[in-house]
Image (cartoon, rainbow, N blue to C red):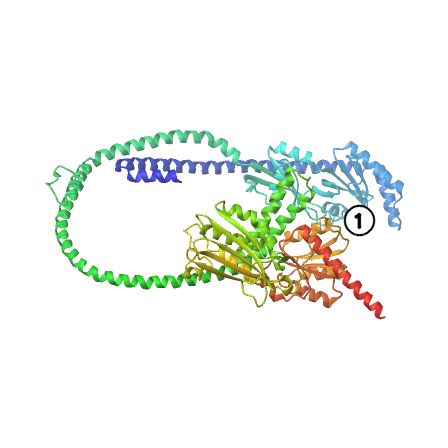
Amino acid sequence: MSAFGAVRRRLRRSSLSVKLAALGAGVTAAVVLITFVALGVEVRASTRVAVTQQLARNQRTLQQLQQRNALDLLYAASLVARRPEMLAAMSISETERNAGGTSRAELVNTVEEQLREGLRSVNADLLLATDDSGRVIAEASSSGAPHPVRPGTNLRALGAVRHALDPNAPADTGSLAVLRADSGYVAAAVYPVTQGGFTLGALVIGKWLDARFIGDVSTTSDAEVVLAAGPRVIGSSDASLRDAAATLPAVAASARATTLRLGGAEYVAAPVDLGETQMREAVRLWILQPLSPRVAVLMSPVRRDFMLYGAIAVLIAALGAMLVARTVLGPFKRFVQHMRSGAAAEEQHGQFAADGEALEVRTLNDSFNQLMASLGVKRRELEQRTAELTSANVVLTDEINERLRVELALRESEAQLRQSQKLEAIGTLAGGIAHDFNNLITVISGYTQLALMRAVRNSPEAEDLRQVVEASDRAANLTHQLLAFSRKQVLQPTVLDLGEVVAGIAPMLRRIIGEHIELRIESGGPLARVRADRGQLEQVLLNLAVNARDAMTKGGVLTIATRNVCPATARERIAPRDGATGVALVVADTGTGMRDDVKDRIFEPFFTTKEAGKGTGLGLATVYGIVKQSGGTIGVESELGAGSTFTITLPAAEMLAATGAMPEAEAELPRGTETILIVEDAEDVRILARRTLEERGYTVLVARNAAEALEISHARHIDVLLTDIVMPQVSGPQLVARYRASGPLPYVIYMSGYADDALAQYELEPGTVFLRKPFSPAVLARTVRTAIDAARSVERSAAGANHAAD
């Protein structure tokens, strides 16, 4: 695209003679191209007509061959039907059946023997004998396969059989019927077996519609062949056409050939009806001729000639246009030079000798003389007007300065409004995408961990899978960071030692801040435990350390201290561990510090004092959101030139209500034999959970919604109900309520990837087992096993208490 733009700019700046030459060449090339395209369309149309006519002839030839085959088969069947042994055996068999019994085995064997002898003497693959009701009593096959059509099968639904047994019934169209056997389709003819004016039954004789038949038709017609029965394609001469030809049965069959596209190629197709089976399936033979190769063969020499003569025509047009341009544009070039000399001096010097030039040049010369005279008058008026505007400009400058001050104040107000709107919009968006994004992370991480369990330890494949798992964990952390500053992230809090968190991330912080900054870690003795998300606390420390590093460009000291606090203490007092109500985390630097106006805005989203492109304005906003959502507080003290100190206080874990958190996972994944019903509207998560639990020995049933879950529960005993909370129409808690109303309630485990505030409306019962998305297969297996064991332990305790009371 850039090369084309450069050529276009060069052509725009070139002389008019070059442009005329390019225009002539372009018009000639367009004419040659249009002519070639029109010729190609005409050749394709002519080729289509020729191929269509050829297919029509092939179609008529095949129809004649089908009629001839029908006559040959009927003649062969008549020879078998007239055999005395055949007539005698079928007559006796008919008499025995009319007497209320069944045909003797020796009579059936006699009929089968006659069929086998007849089949050896005729060119056919299958020979059947039916009674007067159309039921098969014996059969013989050239392939030797037992019972291609089982004895007792009623073929009266086949039009040709119905016609042979009852001359008054409507005849089937054409002489050749199609029989659907157990192992394929047969092109068959039916001949009645009569004796003394009575119909004893019928003989069905035919040939298999198999690959040999398709190959013979393809060779005879010199075309591709597709055989279809009803909506199915049952064979084709080209295996690559089989899938593409699946749309052929849907094409309305007609006696005339039609044009269609199969597999990206254009074909001319003509159908040949072979008849209907006893299942009322229309069997058709499609003859296909590819159109594009024939057109390419015809167009190849034409394209070569057009390119040669077209190039010659374009060259001649370009040279002719350039020659004409030079002849016509010579006087115009001299006049332009005269105009440039007058324009440079802002006044006219002499007259252009235009008496012997063309009318257009003389007209341009007169107009130029008038223009130069007018410019002299306008220049004097402009000088006078400039003096007047200079005096007015002083007044306007004062008005503009005042307006600029007002607009600046308005822009600051609008910027503050936009910042608040950004926070609200991003918070709403982040809460909405958390569910779907966590589902995707669950599937990616889950399947990767399942593959990792089966991989050879320390193999390259196992290492690649571990990289995918780590990338999935980083993706989950990115979601947490996006949600953190809006206080909508899904936290996974655990009881932890804040000092251990600081010690664990200290090596990473030293690498981030650099060797020119000293990192000091201070601890005020044993610390009370806090309940928080370890990853989010590490994100807080990382953001504060990065800000401190940017404030100490010439080096300094970064101090991170932890200590206990009690209700009556200020930030400076250290409380004993047992009496502590919280833990303080202090991050102090010796950097440049902040002014008061900057300090008041540091927690605002998108506010930054860094250069454009070096800060997002979300670092401290994220810190604020994490601390607030963890139930803590944050404060800052800073003085310009004396550094900054951030103090974060988190409540002690003993002050928080107990939650339904699961114990830490063990190395070996637990197993079980219970029946688990998974209700999840996300198919990929549903499949992952089912596969994980089935590999651990559980019997797993799945449902997409509450209606399917209730239907399954009525038919099967369920030990554990693992259900998503937020689902279309009926939520997980509503499903549990309906389950409880209809019978005993199994053990219930809820799961969700929505943010905490989005789940608040569902009012889960206290002590409910809850599984956060994204989860790994190991977490899922241990959560289910722990929930089952805990519930059964409660049941055993209750049963023991009741027994003791009795």
SS for tag 1?
A: loop
Q: Is residue 627 left or right of residue 371?
A: right
Residue 559: give x, y in percent of width and height: 52, 53
Residue 782: give x, y in percent of width and height: 71, 53
Task: Relative to 389, say whether 230 is above or below.
Answer: above
Name the foreground residue: 658 vs 3. 658
Quarter of the C terminus within the rendering: bottom right
User: What residue is shown at x 79% (from left), y 66% (from top)?
Assistant: 798
Name the foreground residue: 281 vs 607. 607
Residue 55: give x, y in percent of width and height: 57, 37
Residue 537: give x, y in percent of width and height: 57, 55
User: What residue is shown at x 71% (from left), y 56% (from top)?
Assistant: 784
Q: Is residue 496 left or right of residue 391?
A: right
Residue 409 occupies which quadrant of the picture? bottom left
Quarter of the N terminus within the rendering: top left
Name the foreground residue: 340 vs 415. 415
Task: Relative to 26, say whether 409 is above or below.
Answer: below
User: What residue is shown at x 65% (from left), y 51% (from top)?
Assistant: 776
Q: Is residue 640 left or right of residue 434?
A: left
User: What residue is shown at x 48% (from left), y 37% (from top)?
Assistant: 44
Kindly give the residue lying farthest to the bottom in the view shown: 806
Residue located beneath label 1 in the image: 133
Categorize mark 1 by other alpha carbons within 10 Å: few (<14), some (14-19), many (20+). Answer: some
Residue type at mark 1: give it: Ser
Q: Is residue 719 visible?
A: no
Q: Is residue 642 visible?
A: yes
Kindly give the residue lying farthest to the left in the view shown: 350
